[in-house]
Image (cartoon, rainbow, N blue to C red):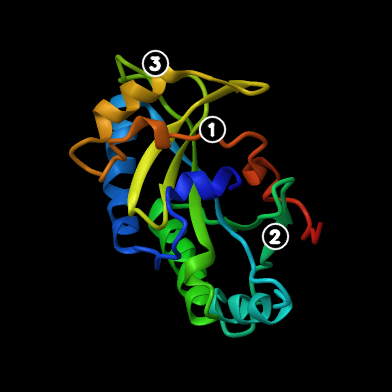
């Protein structure tokens, strides 16, 4: 099994549980209050397309569903990248956490409608230091909140460099979020996601 097969902890396909996503805006308020962290405006949905099924048609449908603003406004680009494990990331941008969660949910739902529910692996939401003037326990580095689609649980991921992470910070963030999110209790499932593509979400679409 590959890395993400291990993350799922299963060999039998299971449908994604998306309801827990809507707890994230409340958790984002807690992160800002307790740690001085705000949304980076970037998120990514990771999945593995079924063999032989092209992504282009789903991409067009996503662009139609995600269309915002006036009727004459162009649809937001659906950017996607491949990783070295053979999985694909759909990159989503929004200025606020509510909109970001809504867009990620739309991506999840669209993939489900395409018959790819069992291919959904995780979603990752970026956070970055904001105004920490009145925050006594402020966090000074970016981190991510990972959503395990099949389990409906979250965990914090705080990379510090090339395949290095701040486990102490992750546990501290867990203590902040415990009352807001269904945090993954099995710490062995807090897998590191190195080389996340979220920082490049403002770039052009990629098909690698």
As rendered, which of 117 and 33 lies closer to the eye? 117
Which x, y percent locates residue 56? 73, 77
**Looking at the image, which residue is at 26% across and 47% down?**
26
Picture disc at residue 192 = 1
As rendered, which of 150 and 162 lies closer to the eye? 150
Q: Is residue 171 at least partly visible in the picture?
A: yes
100 sits to left or right of 26:
right
Q: Label 2's element?
A: strand
60 sits to left or right of 107:
right
Mark 3 / mark 2, whichever is N-terminal: 2
Q: Image quarter for residue 67?
A: bottom right
The residue singled out by tag 3 in the image is 168
Q: Label 3's element?
A: helix
The residue singled out by tag 2 in the image is 80
Of all residues, the one furthest to the bottom in this rendering is 71
Mark 1 / mark 3, whichever is N-terminal: 3
Q: Image quarter for residue 33?
A: top left
């Amino acid at each position: 099994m590959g890395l993400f097969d291990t993350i799922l902890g299963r060999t039998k396909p299971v449908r994604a549980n998306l309801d827990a996503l809507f707890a994230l805006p409340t958790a984002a308020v807690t992160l800002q209050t307790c740690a001085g962290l705000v949304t980076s405006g970037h998120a990514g949905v990771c999945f593995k397309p079924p063999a032989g099924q092209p992504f282009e048609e789903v991409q067009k449908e996503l662009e139609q569903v995600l269309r915002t603003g006036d009727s004459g406004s162009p649809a937001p680009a659906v950017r996607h990248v491949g990783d070295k494990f053979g999985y694909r990331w759909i990159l989503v941008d929004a200025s606020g956490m509510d909109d970001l969660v809504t867009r990620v949910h739309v991506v999840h739902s669209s993939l489900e409608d395409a018959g790819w529910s069992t291919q959904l692996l995780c979603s990752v939401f970026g956070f970055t230091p904001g105004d920490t003037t009145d925050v006594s326990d402020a966090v000074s580095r970016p981190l991510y909140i990972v959503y395990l689609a099949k389990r409906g649980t979250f965990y914090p991921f705080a990379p510090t460099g090339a395949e290095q992470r701040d486990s102490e910070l992750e546990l501290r963030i867990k203590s902040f979020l415990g009352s807001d999110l269904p945090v993954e209790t099995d710490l062995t499932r807090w897998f590191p996601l190195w080389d996340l593509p979220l920082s490049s979400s403002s770039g052009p679409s990629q098909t690698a």
